[in-house]
Image (cartoon, rainbow, N blue to C red):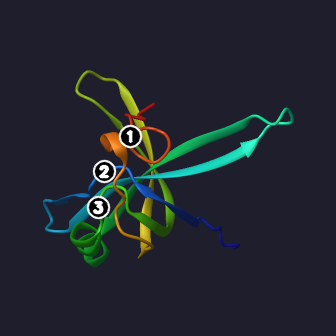
């Protein structure tokens, strides 16, 4: 039987301060949004930029480290795996969320002050449920 590979590595900026909670079974989970940006020039020389948002989930001791040390605007490296969650709300609507379950996080810089309170590029994360 062959093995698969599900590995994601990202470097980006936190879109908001991390949020933590404890599950009913007593496990700590911390979540935060991470923005990655790329820029390019079209053939006519016009500069373009796009920002992609990721929902990051950390568990256990990594969740505690993220909650204690990360802040909005901070640049971090996150390595983990993709996970898709599906659920149905009380009105019967189906929802889906793709998230990164973090295995490792490395802080790359201090939070940045951005005029107007926004991200250096792009905007704060919006609801991406589909």
Residue indicated by mark 3: 71
Residue identifier under label 1? 124
Provide the secondary structure element on which disc 3 rests: loop
* Number of residues whose C-alpha sits closer than 10 Å to that of mark 3, classed few (under 14), some (14–19) or many (20 or more): some
Mark 1–mark 3 Cα distance, whole angstroms, equals 14 Å
Mark 1 Cα shell of 10 Å, populated few (<14), some (14-19), many (≥20) = some
As drawn, 103 above or below 84:
below
| Numbered-mark total | 3
Describe the element under mark 2 as helix, strand or loop: loop
Residue 51 position in % (x across, y down): 55, 43
Mark 2 and mark 3 in contact? Answer it, CB < 8 Å: no
Left or right: 17 with respect to 77? left
Could you tell me which residue is drawn at 81 percent across and 37 percent down? 45
Q: Is residue 120 left or right of residue 18?
A: right
Image coordinates for residue 31, horizontal then vertical, percent: 30, 57
Answer with the quarter of the image where residue 34 lies.
bottom left
Residue under label 2, please give it: 16
In the displayed orientation, state which residue is furthest to the front. Answer: 115
């Amino acid at each position: 039987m062959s093995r698969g590979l599900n590995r994601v590595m990202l470097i980006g900026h936190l879109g908001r301060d991390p949020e933590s909670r404890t599950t009913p079974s007593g496990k700590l989970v911390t979540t935060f949004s991470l923005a990655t940006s790329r820029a390019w020039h079209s053939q006519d020389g016009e500069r373009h930029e796009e920002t992609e948002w990721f929902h990051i989930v950390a568990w256990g001791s990594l969740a505690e480290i993220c909650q204690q040390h990360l802040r909005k605007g901070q640049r971090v490296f996150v390595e983990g795996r993709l996970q898709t969650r599906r659920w149905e709300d009380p009105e019967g609507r189906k929802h889906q969320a793709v998230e990164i379950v973090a295995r490792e996080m490395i802080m790359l810089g201090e939070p940045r002050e951005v005029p107007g309170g926004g991200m250096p590029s792009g905007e704060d994360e919006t609801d991406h449920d589909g």
